[in-house]
Amino acid sequence: MTTRIGLSTSSVYPESTAHGFAYAARLGYDAVEVMVGIDALSQQTAAVRQLSEHHGLPICAVHAPTLLLTQRVWGTEPWGKLERSAEMAHEVGAGTVVVHPPFRWQKEYAKGFVEGIAALEASTGLAFAVENMYPWRAQVRGRTAGTEMYLPGWDPSAEEYAHATIDLSHAAIAEDDVVEMAQRLGERLHHVHLTDGSGSAKDEHLVPGRGGMGAARFLRHLAATGFGTAYGGDIVLEINTRRCADAEEREADLRQSLEFAREHFTVPAT
């Protein structure tokens, strides 16, 4: 079993899902994670499958539309969104659905979330990898205050999920140590959003190595503990390139991110 290094289509925003596949193919990524979002193409299973076939790139994961900006994508009923994400994953050959925990105001959804995710996994045969999030932080009278905005919580290692995703940018905001989180999760760590963060209140999604999360150390830890080889899992680059001046600069960031992942995720020789 070989760990795939994939590219999230969100990494090329504001360019399209189609551009995401094109960059991934041109730069030599192993797979693609499709972010189901406001790009209409990302919501169309047939179109996504055609892109995968055209570029010869497998789809490793489907990211369910559970972000604030995608609250109305595929309707407003949260379980319906996850069911449609599972349908897309089956149709395009992905084994993983990435999902955020419920927002605090989604009380009914949150009430049975842990059990509902387990039931979906049992009925679909897919891994629903719940992603770590963070408190929403703001400056109040010159001091930083954090507000819990997710239920049952932002740290998947504190719940009984069978599969989880670690996102380094989210961990930076929450001031979480990603190696310690990975240790708590053990073989439940199924998916990684490789990126970086400086620890500010913003969800930065920096190129790995440009922040303070110890992304290289994290990758070495994963390799040493058998992630992706002994117990499965994919590493997906999910960076923010919105501020790139042009496509050339965006491609350079995507290339550097891939090179970083391959340099530091090195499985020890046996």
Image: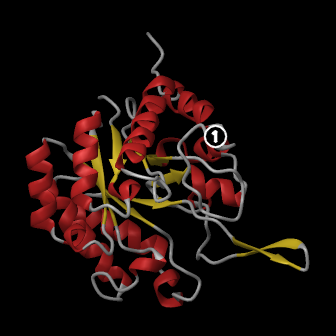
Looking at the picture, how far across and down is residue 141, in whole percent? 91, 80
| Whether residue 173 is situated above or below residue 150 in the rendered picture | above
Determine if residue 52 is in view: yes
Q: Quadrant of residue 92?
A: bottom left
Residue beneath the point at 62% across and 46% down: 184
The quarter of the rendered structure image containing the C terminus is top left
Disc 1 packing (10 Å; few <14; some 14–19; many ≥20) = some
In the image, residue 252 lies at what x, y percent?
41, 38
> Is 97 left or right of 114, judged from the image as shown?
left
Left or right: residue 47 compared with residue 109: left
Q: Quadrant of residue 96?
A: bottom left
Residue under pointer 1: 179
Q: In the picture provided, is 106 more to the left or to the right than 92?
A: right
Instruction: Find residue 129 and report its horizontal and vertical position in percent.
Output: 42, 58
The residue positioned 70% from the left and 65% from the top of the image is 201
Task: Specify the amino acid type for callout 1.
Answer: Val
Query: What is the image's colouring?
Result: secondary structure
Looking at the picture, tell me which residue is in the foreground, 56 or 25. 25
Task: Indicate whether 170 appears above or below 119.
Answer: above
Element at label 1:
helix
Residue depicted at x 56% and y 47%: 185
Q: Position of residue 15 (x, y in %)?
A: 32, 61
Count of residue discs: 1
Which quadrant would the N terminus be assigned to in this image? top left
Q: Residue furthest front?
A: 245
Quarter where residue 84 is shown = bottom left
**Viewer-proximal residue among 10 and 130:** 10
Question: Viewed as shown, does residue 171 lie left or right of 200?
Answer: left
Q: Is residue 157 visible?
A: no
